[in-house]
Amino acid sequence: MADTKDPATIALRGNWSSVLGFVLASIGSAIGLGNVWRFPYITGQYGGGAFVLVYIACVLAVGIPIMLAEFLIGRKTQRNCVGAFRLLRPGSPWIITGWLGVVSGFVILSFYGVVGGWVLHYTFLSLQNGFVGRSPEEVSTLFASLASSPVQQIIGHTLFMLVTITIVAGGIHRGIERSNKVMMPALFLLLCGLLVYALRTEGAKAGLEFLLHPRWDQMSPTGILEALGQAFFSLSLGMGAMITYGSYLSRDTNLVRASFFVAFGDTLVAVLAGFVIFPLVFTFQLEPGGGPGLIFQTLPIAFSQLPAGIIVGSAFFILLAFAALTSAISLLEVVVAYFIDERGWTRRKTTWILGTVIFFCGVPSAIWKNVFGLMDQLATNFLLPFGAFLIALFVGWVLSQQERLAEFEPNEIRTVAYLGWTFLIRYVSPVAVAIIFLHLLRLL
Ligand code: TRP
Protein backbone atom coordinates (compact mmCIF):
# COMPACT_ATOMS: atom_id res chain seq x y z
CA MET A 1 0.00 0.00 0.00
CA ALA A 2 3.06 2.19 -0.16
CA ASP A 3 1.76 3.94 -3.26
CA THR A 4 -1.17 5.41 -1.39
CA LYS A 5 1.02 7.41 0.96
CA ASP A 6 3.42 9.06 -1.41
CA PRO A 7 3.67 12.86 -1.31
CA ALA A 8 1.88 13.26 -4.63
CA THR A 9 -1.21 11.42 -3.33
CA ILE A 10 -1.16 13.42 -0.13
CA ALA A 11 -0.91 16.64 -2.11
CA LEU A 12 -3.94 15.62 -4.16
CA ARG A 13 -6.12 14.34 -1.31
CA GLY A 14 -4.89 16.60 1.50
CA ASN A 15 -4.03 15.67 5.07
CA TRP A 16 -4.63 16.95 8.60
CA SER A 17 -1.85 19.25 9.74
CA SER A 18 -1.93 17.90 13.30
CA VAL A 19 -3.56 15.28 15.49
CA LEU A 20 -5.38 18.09 17.26
CA GLY A 21 -6.87 19.20 13.94
CA PHE A 22 -8.08 15.67 13.26
CA VAL A 23 -9.55 15.21 16.73
CA LEU A 24 -11.32 18.59 16.63
CA ALA A 25 -12.76 17.85 13.18
CA SER A 26 -14.01 14.44 14.34
CA ILE A 27 -15.54 15.93 17.47
CA GLY A 28 -17.02 18.60 15.20
CA SER A 29 -18.60 15.91 13.05
CA ALA A 30 -19.96 14.10 16.09
CA ILE A 31 -21.33 17.13 17.92
CA GLY A 32 -24.32 18.31 15.97
CA LEU A 33 -28.08 18.59 16.04
CA GLY A 34 -28.05 15.08 17.50
CA ASN A 35 -26.55 16.37 20.74
CA VAL A 36 -28.35 19.65 21.27
CA TRP A 37 -31.69 18.93 19.68
CA ARG A 38 -32.33 15.17 19.81
CA PHE A 39 -30.51 13.94 22.94
CA PRO A 40 -32.24 16.25 25.47
CA TYR A 41 -35.75 15.53 24.26
CA ILE A 42 -35.44 11.75 24.07
CA THR A 43 -33.73 11.72 27.45
CA GLY A 44 -36.84 13.47 28.74
CA GLN A 45 -39.04 10.80 27.20
CA TYR A 46 -37.19 7.77 28.53
CA GLY A 47 -36.64 8.30 32.22
CA GLY A 48 -33.97 11.02 32.47
CA GLY A 49 -30.93 9.64 34.31
CA ALA A 50 -31.91 6.07 33.41
CA PHE A 51 -31.62 6.91 29.72
CA VAL A 52 -28.33 8.74 30.27
CA LEU A 53 -26.83 5.65 31.94
CA VAL A 54 -28.02 3.27 29.21
CA TYR A 55 -26.75 5.70 26.59
CA ILE A 56 -23.28 5.83 28.15
CA ALA A 57 -23.19 2.02 28.24
CA CYS A 58 -24.06 1.94 24.50
CA VAL A 59 -21.33 4.45 23.69
CA LEU A 60 -18.75 2.39 25.59
CA ALA A 61 -19.77 -1.07 24.40
CA VAL A 62 -20.74 -0.36 20.79
CA GLY A 63 -20.04 3.25 19.81
CA ILE A 64 -16.32 3.45 20.64
CA PRO A 65 -15.48 0.03 19.12
CA ILE A 66 -17.17 0.93 15.83
CA MET A 67 -15.57 4.36 15.76
CA LEU A 68 -12.16 2.74 16.22
CA ALA A 69 -13.02 0.29 13.43
CA GLU A 70 -13.88 3.17 11.06
CA PHE A 71 -10.72 5.14 11.89
CA LEU A 72 -8.72 1.95 11.36
CA ILE A 73 -10.15 1.26 7.89
CA GLY A 74 -9.61 4.88 6.86
CA ARG A 75 -6.07 5.27 8.06
CA LYS A 76 -5.01 1.87 6.77
CA THR A 77 -6.21 2.54 3.23
CA GLN A 78 -5.95 6.36 2.97
CA ARG A 79 -9.02 6.19 0.77
CA ASN A 80 -12.65 7.32 0.66
CA CYS A 81 -15.24 4.87 1.98
CA VAL A 82 -15.76 3.07 -1.35
CA GLY A 83 -12.08 2.95 -2.32
CA ALA A 84 -11.17 1.65 1.15
CA PHE A 85 -13.25 -1.52 0.77
CA ARG A 86 -12.08 -1.97 -2.82
CA LEU A 87 -8.45 -1.78 -1.73
CA LEU A 88 -8.85 -4.16 1.20
CA ARG A 89 -10.99 -6.82 -0.54
CA PRO A 90 -10.83 -6.20 -4.30
CA GLY A 91 -13.76 -7.53 -6.29
CA SER A 92 -15.78 -8.55 -3.23
CA PRO A 93 -19.34 -7.44 -2.40
CA TRP A 94 -18.01 -5.56 0.65
CA ILE A 95 -17.76 -2.54 -1.60
CA ILE A 96 -21.52 -2.21 -1.08
CA THR A 97 -20.77 -0.98 2.44
CA GLY A 98 -18.91 1.93 0.89
CA TRP A 99 -21.68 2.64 -1.59
CA LEU A 100 -24.19 2.68 1.25
CA GLY A 101 -22.06 5.33 2.93
CA VAL A 102 -22.11 7.60 -0.11
CA VAL A 103 -25.88 7.16 -0.49
CA SER A 104 -26.40 7.88 3.23
CA GLY A 105 -24.37 11.06 2.84
CA PHE A 106 -26.82 12.30 0.20
CA VAL A 107 -29.88 11.28 2.19
CA ILE A 108 -28.79 12.65 5.57
CA LEU A 109 -27.36 15.91 4.29
CA SER A 110 -30.48 16.63 2.27
CA PHE A 111 -32.67 16.93 5.38
CA TYR A 112 -29.85 18.02 7.71
CA GLY A 113 -29.46 21.07 5.48
CA VAL A 114 -33.12 21.93 5.96
CA VAL A 115 -32.81 21.78 9.77
CA GLY A 116 -29.55 23.73 9.42
CA GLY A 117 -31.63 26.36 7.61
CA TRP A 118 -34.08 26.53 10.54
CA VAL A 119 -31.12 27.05 12.86
CA LEU A 120 -29.82 29.95 10.75
CA HIS A 121 -33.33 31.43 10.62
CA TYR A 122 -33.56 31.29 14.41
CA THR A 123 -30.06 32.71 14.78
CA PHE A 124 -31.08 35.79 12.78
CA LEU A 125 -34.39 36.04 14.64
CA SER A 126 -32.70 36.02 18.01
CA LEU A 127 -29.99 38.46 16.96
CA GLN A 128 -32.74 40.85 15.86
CA ASN A 129 -34.41 40.47 19.22
CA GLY A 130 -37.24 38.64 17.52
CA PHE A 131 -38.54 36.78 20.59
CA VAL A 132 -38.58 39.49 23.22
CA GLY A 133 -41.92 41.17 23.81
CA ARG A 134 -43.94 38.41 22.17
CA SER A 135 -46.45 36.28 24.02
CA PRO A 136 -45.72 32.55 24.44
CA GLU A 137 -48.39 31.78 21.82
CA GLU A 138 -46.81 34.13 19.32
CA VAL A 139 -43.36 32.65 19.92
CA SER A 140 -44.53 29.12 19.36
CA THR A 141 -46.41 30.02 16.21
CA LEU A 142 -43.14 31.40 14.79
CA PHE A 143 -42.00 27.83 14.29
CA ALA A 144 -45.29 26.71 12.76
CA SER A 145 -45.11 29.55 10.26
CA LEU A 146 -41.51 28.68 9.35
CA ALA A 147 -42.37 24.99 8.99
CA SER A 148 -45.24 25.81 6.66
CA SER A 149 -43.30 28.24 4.48
CA PRO A 150 -41.25 26.44 1.82
CA VAL A 151 -39.76 29.76 0.66
CA GLN A 152 -38.35 30.67 4.06
CA GLN A 153 -37.05 27.18 4.57
CA ILE A 154 -35.41 27.07 1.16
CA ILE A 155 -33.70 30.41 1.83
CA GLY A 156 -32.24 29.01 5.07
CA HIS A 157 -31.31 25.73 3.41
CA THR A 158 -29.55 27.60 0.56
CA LEU A 159 -27.51 29.69 2.97
CA PHE A 160 -26.59 26.71 5.10
CA MET A 161 -25.49 24.66 2.08
CA LEU A 162 -23.50 27.59 0.66
CA VAL A 163 -21.46 27.90 3.84
CA THR A 164 -20.96 24.12 4.01
CA ILE A 165 -19.82 23.95 0.37
CA THR A 166 -17.46 26.90 0.73
CA ILE A 167 -15.72 25.26 3.69
CA VAL A 168 -15.40 21.81 2.10
CA ALA A 169 -14.17 23.34 -1.18
CA GLY A 170 -11.33 24.90 0.83
CA GLY A 171 -9.80 21.46 1.40
CA ILE A 172 -8.95 19.28 4.36
CA HIS A 173 -6.39 21.51 5.98
CA ARG A 174 -7.41 24.99 4.88
CA GLY A 175 -11.17 24.44 4.82
CA ILE A 176 -12.32 21.71 7.18
CA GLU A 177 -9.55 21.71 9.77
CA ARG A 178 -9.30 25.47 9.99
CA SER A 179 -13.05 26.07 10.35
CA ASN A 180 -13.29 23.41 13.05
CA LYS A 181 -10.41 25.04 14.90
CA VAL A 182 -12.48 28.22 15.10
CA MET A 183 -15.99 26.85 15.52
CA MET A 184 -15.34 24.08 18.05
CA PRO A 185 -13.53 26.18 20.69
CA ALA A 186 -16.18 28.88 20.17
CA LEU A 187 -18.88 26.27 20.70
CA PHE A 188 -17.28 25.12 23.98
CA LEU A 189 -16.96 28.69 25.23
CA LEU A 190 -20.58 29.52 24.37
CA LEU A 191 -21.68 26.31 26.06
CA CYS A 192 -19.74 27.14 29.23
CA GLY A 193 -21.19 30.65 29.31
CA LEU A 194 -24.74 29.36 28.83
CA LEU A 195 -24.14 26.70 31.47
CA VAL A 196 -23.08 29.22 34.10
CA TYR A 197 -26.15 31.28 33.26
CA ALA A 198 -28.62 28.38 33.22
CA LEU A 199 -27.36 26.87 36.46
CA ARG A 200 -28.08 30.13 38.27
CA THR A 201 -31.73 30.31 37.22
CA GLU A 202 -34.55 29.29 39.52
CA GLY A 203 -35.31 26.14 37.57
CA ALA A 204 -31.73 24.81 37.81
CA LYS A 205 -32.47 22.28 40.53
CA ALA A 206 -35.60 20.94 38.85
CA GLY A 207 -33.81 20.83 35.49
CA LEU A 208 -30.86 18.85 36.80
CA GLU A 209 -33.13 16.54 38.73
CA PHE A 210 -35.19 15.92 35.57
CA LEU A 211 -32.09 14.98 33.60
CA LEU A 212 -30.16 13.06 36.22
CA HIS A 213 -32.63 11.27 38.45
CA PRO A 214 -33.01 7.75 37.02
CA ARG A 215 -36.67 6.89 36.66
CA TRP A 216 -36.25 3.25 35.75
CA ASP A 217 -40.00 2.69 35.39
CA GLN A 218 -39.93 4.87 32.26
CA MET A 219 -37.07 2.89 30.74
CA SER A 220 -38.21 0.20 28.34
CA PRO A 221 -36.63 -2.10 25.74
CA THR A 222 -37.56 0.53 23.16
CA GLY A 223 -35.66 3.05 25.25
CA ILE A 224 -32.54 0.87 25.10
CA LEU A 225 -32.83 0.62 21.32
CA GLU A 226 -33.36 4.37 21.06
CA ALA A 227 -30.19 4.85 23.09
CA LEU A 228 -28.19 2.68 20.72
CA GLY A 229 -29.60 4.39 17.61
CA GLN A 230 -28.91 7.77 19.16
CA ALA A 231 -25.31 6.70 19.88
CA PHE A 232 -24.74 5.94 16.17
CA PHE A 233 -26.27 9.13 14.95
CA SER A 234 -24.55 11.28 17.53
CA LEU A 235 -21.10 9.72 17.06
CA SER A 236 -21.44 9.96 13.23
CA LEU A 237 -21.09 6.20 12.77
CA GLY A 238 -22.30 3.75 10.16
CA MET A 239 -21.73 5.63 6.91
CA GLY A 240 -18.01 5.99 6.62
CA ALA A 241 -17.69 9.57 7.87
CA MET A 242 -15.03 8.42 10.32
CA ILE A 243 -13.43 6.24 7.62
CA THR A 244 -13.09 9.36 5.48
CA TYR A 245 -11.72 11.52 8.30
CA GLY A 246 -9.35 8.70 9.34
CA SER A 247 -8.04 8.51 5.77
CA TYR A 248 -6.37 11.91 6.11
CA LEU A 249 -4.36 10.75 9.13
CA SER A 250 -0.73 9.82 9.28
CA ARG A 251 0.49 6.66 10.93
CA ASP A 252 1.65 8.06 14.24
CA THR A 253 -1.77 8.72 15.77
CA ASN A 254 -3.02 6.60 18.63
CA LEU A 255 -6.46 5.60 17.35
CA VAL A 256 -7.70 4.11 20.63
CA ARG A 257 -7.04 7.33 22.47
CA ALA A 258 -8.59 9.41 19.67
CA SER A 259 -11.79 7.31 19.69
CA PHE A 260 -12.18 7.67 23.46
CA PHE A 261 -11.57 11.37 23.26
CA VAL A 262 -14.11 11.98 20.49
CA ALA A 263 -16.77 9.84 22.20
CA PHE A 264 -16.14 11.53 25.54
CA GLY A 265 -16.36 15.04 24.07
CA ASP A 266 -19.54 14.20 22.21
CA THR A 267 -21.26 12.69 25.24
CA LEU A 268 -20.17 15.52 27.50
CA VAL A 269 -21.64 18.12 25.15
CA ALA A 270 -24.93 16.19 24.88
CA VAL A 271 -25.29 16.09 28.68
CA LEU A 272 -24.21 19.72 29.13
CA ALA A 273 -26.69 20.84 26.45
CA GLY A 274 -29.36 19.21 28.62
CA PHE A 275 -28.00 21.13 31.63
CA VAL A 276 -28.56 24.36 29.70
CA ILE A 277 -31.96 23.55 28.24
CA PHE A 278 -33.88 22.00 31.15
CA PRO A 279 -33.13 24.65 33.81
CA LEU A 280 -34.53 27.27 31.40
CA VAL A 281 -37.55 25.09 30.62
CA PHE A 282 -38.30 24.62 34.33
CA THR A 283 -37.71 28.26 35.24
CA PHE A 284 -40.68 29.20 33.07
CA GLN A 285 -42.71 26.08 33.87
CA LEU A 286 -42.71 24.96 30.27
CA GLU A 287 -43.29 21.44 29.01
CA PRO A 288 -40.03 19.40 29.25
CA GLY A 289 -41.42 16.49 27.23
CA GLY A 290 -42.06 18.78 24.25
CA GLY A 291 -40.46 16.32 21.83
CA PRO A 292 -38.78 17.51 18.64
CA GLY A 293 -40.18 21.04 19.05
CA LEU A 294 -38.37 21.50 22.38
CA ILE A 295 -35.62 23.67 20.97
CA PHE A 296 -37.50 25.63 18.35
CA GLN A 297 -40.86 26.08 20.07
CA THR A 298 -40.43 25.69 23.81
CA LEU A 299 -37.02 27.21 24.45
CA PRO A 300 -37.62 30.52 22.59
CA ILE A 301 -40.51 31.14 25.02
CA ALA A 302 -37.92 31.12 27.79
CA PHE A 303 -35.70 33.48 25.73
CA SER A 304 -38.62 35.86 25.21
CA GLN A 305 -39.04 36.25 28.97
CA LEU A 306 -35.46 36.24 30.23
CA PRO A 307 -33.96 39.62 31.17
CA ALA A 308 -30.95 38.99 28.89
CA GLY A 309 -32.98 36.94 26.43
CA ILE A 310 -31.44 38.44 23.33
CA ILE A 311 -27.91 37.52 24.46
CA VAL A 312 -28.78 34.07 25.78
CA GLY A 313 -30.97 33.23 22.78
CA SER A 314 -28.39 34.42 20.26
CA ALA A 315 -25.58 32.55 22.02
CA PHE A 316 -27.67 29.40 22.01
CA PHE A 317 -28.55 29.49 18.31
CA ILE A 318 -25.03 30.50 17.24
CA LEU A 319 -23.77 27.48 19.17
CA LEU A 320 -26.33 25.30 17.43
CA ALA A 321 -25.36 26.72 14.01
CA PHE A 322 -21.68 25.88 14.63
CA ALA A 323 -22.62 22.39 15.78
CA ALA A 324 -24.76 21.77 12.69
CA LEU A 325 -22.19 23.19 10.25
CA THR A 326 -19.24 21.15 11.50
CA SER A 327 -21.40 18.02 11.13
CA ALA A 328 -22.71 18.91 7.67
CA ILE A 329 -19.12 19.44 6.51
CA SER A 330 -18.30 15.83 7.39
CA LEU A 331 -21.37 14.54 5.58
CA LEU A 332 -20.45 16.39 2.40
CA GLU A 333 -16.80 15.33 2.68
CA VAL A 334 -17.77 11.63 2.53
CA VAL A 335 -19.39 12.15 -0.87
CA VAL A 336 -16.74 14.57 -2.15
CA ALA A 337 -13.83 12.29 -1.16
CA TYR A 338 -15.34 9.50 -3.25
CA PHE A 339 -15.49 11.61 -6.41
CA ILE A 340 -12.00 13.05 -5.87
CA ASP A 341 -10.33 9.65 -5.27
CA GLU A 342 -12.26 7.47 -7.65
CA ARG A 343 -13.12 9.84 -10.47
CA GLY A 344 -10.10 12.11 -10.28
CA TRP A 345 -12.19 15.31 -10.16
CA THR A 346 -10.71 18.39 -8.53
CA ARG A 347 -11.92 19.29 -5.07
CA ARG A 348 -13.43 22.62 -6.02
CA LYS A 349 -15.42 21.23 -8.94
CA THR A 350 -16.55 18.15 -7.00
CA THR A 351 -17.69 20.13 -3.99
CA TRP A 352 -19.72 22.69 -5.93
CA ILE A 353 -21.37 20.12 -8.19
CA LEU A 354 -22.25 17.64 -5.45
CA GLY A 355 -23.19 20.31 -2.95
CA THR A 356 -25.64 21.71 -5.50
CA VAL A 357 -27.08 18.27 -6.26
CA ILE A 358 -27.56 17.60 -2.54
CA PHE A 359 -29.13 21.04 -2.15
CA PHE A 360 -31.75 20.11 -4.75
CA CYS A 361 -32.31 16.74 -3.08
CA GLY A 362 -33.14 18.67 0.08
CA VAL A 363 -35.74 20.93 -1.52
CA PRO A 364 -38.57 18.34 -1.34
CA SER A 365 -37.84 17.96 2.40
CA ALA A 366 -38.38 21.69 2.81
CA ILE A 367 -41.71 21.53 0.95
CA TRP A 368 -43.26 18.29 2.17
CA LYS A 369 -43.04 17.18 5.77
CA ASN A 370 -43.51 13.51 4.86
CA VAL A 371 -40.49 13.56 2.59
CA PHE A 372 -38.50 15.07 5.44
CA GLY A 373 -39.72 12.34 7.81
CA LEU A 374 -39.07 9.63 5.26
CA MET A 375 -35.46 10.72 4.67
CA ASP A 376 -34.84 10.93 8.41
CA GLN A 377 -36.34 7.45 8.97
CA LEU A 378 -34.55 5.92 6.03
CA ALA A 379 -31.20 7.15 7.27
CA THR A 380 -31.42 6.69 11.03
CA ASN A 381 -33.46 3.50 11.12
CA PHE A 382 -32.12 1.74 8.09
CA LEU A 383 -28.95 3.02 6.42
CA LEU A 384 -26.91 3.84 9.54
CA PRO A 385 -27.58 0.67 11.58
CA PHE A 386 -27.10 -1.49 8.51
CA GLY A 387 -23.84 0.29 7.63
CA ALA A 388 -22.58 0.00 11.21
CA PHE A 389 -23.42 -3.71 11.24
CA LEU A 390 -21.44 -4.31 8.03
CA ILE A 391 -18.47 -2.29 9.27
CA ALA A 392 -18.36 -4.25 12.56
CA LEU A 393 -18.53 -7.57 10.68
CA PHE A 394 -15.89 -6.50 8.21
CA VAL A 395 -13.34 -5.37 10.78
CA GLY A 396 -14.15 -8.12 13.28
CA TRP A 397 -14.41 -11.11 10.95
CA VAL A 398 -13.23 -10.34 7.42
CA LEU A 399 -9.98 -8.54 8.20
CA SER A 400 -7.30 -10.89 9.45
CA GLN A 401 -5.70 -10.60 12.85
CA GLN A 402 -2.51 -9.34 11.13
CA GLU A 403 -4.37 -6.66 9.21
CA ARG A 404 -5.91 -5.37 12.42
CA LEU A 405 -2.70 -5.60 14.43
CA ALA A 406 -0.76 -3.64 11.84
CA GLU A 407 -2.64 -0.49 12.86
CA PHE A 408 -1.51 -0.63 16.49
CA GLU A 409 1.83 -0.12 18.16
CA PRO A 410 3.40 -3.28 19.63
CA ASN A 411 2.94 -1.95 23.15
CA GLU A 412 -0.75 -1.25 22.55
CA ILE A 413 -1.54 -4.77 21.47
CA ARG A 414 -1.23 -6.32 24.90
CA THR A 415 -3.35 -3.70 26.60
CA VAL A 416 -6.80 -4.37 27.97
CA ALA A 417 -8.13 -1.71 25.61
CA TYR A 418 -7.01 -3.61 22.52
CA LEU A 419 -8.13 -7.02 23.76
CA GLY A 420 -11.43 -5.60 24.93
CA TRP A 421 -11.97 -3.92 21.58
CA THR A 422 -11.36 -7.13 19.62
CA PHE A 423 -13.97 -8.89 21.74
CA LEU A 424 -16.49 -6.06 21.45
CA ILE A 425 -16.13 -5.57 17.70
CA ARG A 426 -16.45 -9.29 16.95
CA TYR A 427 -19.21 -10.30 19.31
CA VAL A 428 -20.96 -7.42 21.04
CA SER A 429 -21.27 -4.75 18.31
CA PRO A 430 -22.68 -6.88 15.49
CA VAL A 431 -25.17 -8.61 17.78
CA ALA A 432 -26.32 -5.36 19.37
CA VAL A 433 -26.74 -3.68 16.00
CA ALA A 434 -28.54 -6.70 14.54
CA ILE A 435 -31.00 -6.57 17.44
CA ILE A 436 -31.90 -2.91 16.92
CA PHE A 437 -32.06 -3.41 13.25
CA LEU A 438 -34.49 -6.32 13.47
CA HIS A 439 -36.55 -4.48 16.01
CA LEU A 440 -36.77 -1.40 13.81
CA LEU A 441 -37.71 -3.46 10.77
CA ARG A 442 -40.55 -4.99 12.70
CA LEU A 443 -41.71 -1.52 13.54
CA LEU A 444 -41.61 -0.36 9.94
N1 TRP B 1 -23.30 13.35 14.43
C1 TRP B 1 -24.04 14.43 13.88
C2 TRP B 1 -25.05 14.90 14.90
O1 TRP B 1 -25.03 14.52 16.03
C3 TRP B 1 -24.68 14.05 12.58
C4 TRP B 1 -23.75 13.44 11.60
C5 TRP B 1 -22.69 14.03 10.99
C6 TRP B 1 -23.74 12.11 11.18
N2 TRP B 1 -22.05 13.13 10.22
C7 TRP B 1 -22.65 11.95 10.31
C8 TRP B 1 -24.55 11.04 11.50
C9 TRP B 1 -22.37 10.73 9.76
C10 TRP B 1 -24.26 9.82 10.92
C11 TRP B 1 -23.19 9.64 10.09
O2 TRP B 1 -25.88 15.70 14.58
Image (spheres, grey):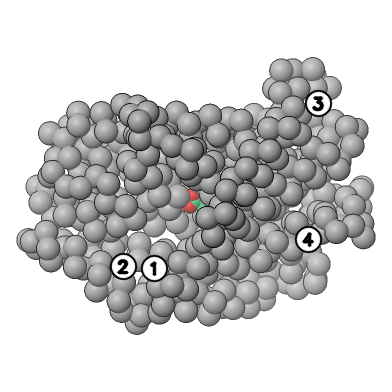
Reply above or below: 332 against 148: above
- Residue 241 seen anywhere in this rendered image of the structure: no
Reply above or below: 347 against 17: below
Q: Nearer the viewer, mark 1 or mark 4?
A: 4
Helix, strand or loop at mark 3: loop
Residue depicted at 40% across the width and 34% down the height = 219
Reply above or below: 45 against 370: above
The mark nearer the N terminus, 3 or 4, is 4
Helix, strand or loop at mark 2: helix
Q: Could you say where residue 307 lies in the image, as x and y percent from the top left?
A: 9, 47
The mark nearer the N terminus, 3 or 1, is 1
Q: Are marks 3 and 4 in contact (CB under 8 Å)?
A: no
Q: Hey, what amino acid is under mark 2?
A: His
Numbered tag placed on residue 121 in the rendering = 2
Residue identifier under label 4: 96
Q: Hey, what amino acid is under mark 4?
A: Ile
